[in-house]
Amino acid sequence: MSSPRLYLIDGSSYIYRAYYAIRHLSNSRGMATNAVYGFTSMLLKIIRDEQPDYLAVVFDSRGPTFRTEIYPEYKANRAAMPEDLVPQIPLIKRVVQGFRLAAFEEPGYEADDIIATLARKASAEGLEVTVVTGDKDLMQIVDERVSLLDTMKDKRFGPAEVGERFGSPDKVVEVQALAGDSSDNVPGVPGIGEKTAKLLIDQFGDLESLLSRLDQIRQPKRRANLEQFADQARLSRRLVTLVDDLPLELDREVLTPGEPDREQLTELFRECEFQRLLDEFSSDPQAVAGSYRAVLSEADFEQLLQRLEAAERFCFDTETTGLDPLRDELVGLSFAVEAGQAWYLPLGHYYLGAPPQLDRELVLKRLAPLFADPEKGKIAQNAKFDALVLHHAGLTLEGLVFDPMLASYLARPAAKSHGMDAMAAELLGYRPIKFEEVCGKGKNRISFAEVEIERAVTYAAEDANITLRLAEILAPLLEETGQEKLFREVELPLEQLLTRMEITGVRIDADFMAGLSREFSDKLQALESGIHQLAGGPFNVASPKQLGEVLFERLKLPKGKKTRTGWSTDVEVLNKLAEDHEIARLILDYRSLAKLKGTYTDALPKLIHEESGRIHTSFNQAVTATGRLSSSDPNLQNIPIRSEEGRRIREGFIPEPGCLMLSADYSQVELRLLAHMAEETTLKEHFCSGEDIHRRTAAEVFGVFPEMVSDEMRRSAKAINFGVIYGISAFGLAKQLGIGRKEAQEYIDGYFARYPKIRAFMDKCIAEAKEHKYVTTLLGRRCAVPEIDSKNGAIRGYAERNAINYPVQGSAADLIKLAMLRVQRRIDAEELSSRMVLQVHDELVFEVPEGELEEMRTLVKEEMETALELDLPLVVDVGVGKNWREAH
DNA sequence: TCCGATCCGTAC
DNA sequence: GACGTACGGATCGGAA
């Protein structure tokens, strides 16, 4: 039988190795976790691969050691521990604790001394010792029973391997005494490296013998050095010699790995958001799960109603036949009042052998007053979806008090997803049943209505339960991050307003769109045949690949920039080619018309709702990095306006008969916010005076009177003004303006000379990002900038530009959200029937009955302009017309 | 047949 | 590589 095996892990050495091996890893709050993760993985690998009988992790102690006492320069060349590693050390110690492993640390000594002591004792007791380290200093303790293991290089060092390098393990210190160790700042003897040292020790046996027989050294220079630095060599020997007689017990019970403390590990891994590790070591998945029951009988339903009526608030979730809440049908509802208990109320399951379900109309009628009661708090994940489903089922949702998705969006801006599954994994360490596991995927996908009720309960009731638990975890996070007010006063009410807007939708003139499509179609055909003719044969113009082949191979036109897979055919390249080549001009026209037709005039009419006759976009409130909304299905925030052809599409956005479209947009909102936030007096004054801001900027940058500013100068100034908001570079500006980089740099320098506070503001933003890994907006919203410390210059540059852009763009998002709420409140208070239909970042669009026009004009302008009080005026331009184009 | 990657282009 | 934020259509190639 082989001897029991003891593994001694050089914790300190592995912490550094883990830190550098895994460069980027942090949790959603921006806390660095790379070393923790790397260390844990390494630890688990050793435990699994080696299955030690005994194990200990050994750490360096903080503060001075006896070595620094005898030689203050010892390790003095070491750089300080990286800033983001420092806070990971206590976490790593918690990992060791959590796995119930022995840990050693000894004031005044290094990990190596402890290892040497333990190894010697263990070896004496007949244990087989493996020292897990990447450090060669430990080679001196190798013997027949003690070896080193470098898991990262997967290399083991026994007496043979050490002998090869140093002669034998007991010669290691002799060699190092002469050669020194640059990484520990051990001096050794000048002019003698490891090779020479080994030769000398081979010859003389040890340091003292060598020093006593220096006359036998032939090389005068070497002899002189050895004479002169003899004491330094002796000192070096003391420094590298490990202490192996510390007063430590070798207690086999302590060294036996225990059962992991799952609770402690769960807490730790949750904090670090290590999903894989959580899955493996979380304390008890059952603790998250709960008892779920189906509501199938009258009695069950009455009981549920009683609980809901008695509760101050409840959590609910809807199940439907699909993801289109205004078209798909309600299949069931789940509820949770307290964590760990949930009900599923099936209403529309439809499969062979389905049990009778409660009468849908009756049930909904009983539930309606609860959902509509603003005093009865409701919690729901992505509540807008459920509110729309309820609306479609004839119910109104009021009294929304919490939405984990929105809370997470604010409190954990760095999180990859604010979806329920991801949050459950990261915040609860729990993996809920996936929708796919219930309904299948691909062609096997069935509707939720076809899912057996028994199975549906486990999925649906779980969702309500998890949502409630997430709310409990996220609510304090909102407080901690100072965003509770933003959540309660802005995001949550906004979600209800967005629900209203989505329900309202916007009217589209389908015939008009069809007419445009026809017109575009004809032009496209003509363009296509022209292009084919010039190309000398047919090909798919819409295929960048084929187009590239035609332009650059068949026609041998000059190539521009590259894409990852070939030569670019984008608008910039084509514009250049268009100077000399008709085909490029045709392609440009083709491209823009194909875009308009495919993306807008063909696509939009298809999305008209059968009943309302309108388009109901989806406003997403938790996707952007800055707090802006986004719009999808369809995206109504990128309807063309810049080109004449494109603008015509807006003529198809029309009001109901008797109404007009009213559009109100903030003028220069981001630049104004920048001036305010940077407290840039000059820029603020320019806005206060009400003059043309780009003209004024041009006057400043080019040093002329405003009336002397040429169109060219104004155009440049405009580009700079925009560039500043985006974190400009000379390269970018040069490209934008088609000028030299040097000239662009001069413009930028001129700009910052005239507006010095802007520069200071940018620096402040980057500093804030570096300190917190996020930046903040006027309302205290946090925007994550996780890669601000990246070692990769390009990535870091990107993060720095974000750090500048986010506060400005995010504050603009804050502002218009406030404005939306204020305007809607006024509309409601004045009992107007005007309806807010669209938000496009700095613009609000309303459908206004003719009789309310004048009131709305002033109301909207007033509320928008006073939504925030800044050091400079906010200006809103209001337009009205019989379609969106005219209103603009 | 579906899905994802790629390229391109629309908005603010 | 190089000026921020989104969404989506068409193509294309690989997987089911």
Image: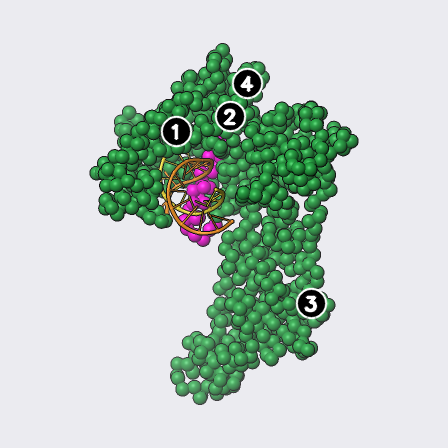
Chain colours: A green, B yellow, C orange
User: Residue at point 43% right, 83% down?
Assistant: A223
From this viewpoint, is residue A614 visible? yes
How would you classify the magenta stretch by its main secondary structure?
A: helix
Which residue matches tag 2? A609
Of the numbered discs 2 and 4, the one sitting upstream in the chain is 2
Q: Quadrant of the C terminus of chain A?
A: top left
Image spot of residue A760 (x, y percent):
43, 39
Image spot of residue A720 (x, y percent):
35, 35
Image spot of residue A461 (x, y percent):
68, 39
Horizontal side of A348 relative to A571 (left or right) equals: right
Of the numbered discs 4 and 1, the one sitting upstream in the chain is 1
Labels 2 and 4 in the same subunit:
yes
Residue A827: mark in rendering: 4
User: What separation in Å lies between label 3 and label 1 (alpha carbons)?
Assistant: 70 Å
Which residue matches tag 3? A255
Q: Amino acid at mark 1?
A: Pro
Query: Which image quadrant for residue A419?
Result: top right
Residue A283 drawn above or below residue A328: below
Image spot of residue A311 (x, y percent):
73, 31
User: Residue at point 42% right, 46% down?
Assistant: A797
Query: Which image quadrant for residue A880?
Result: top left
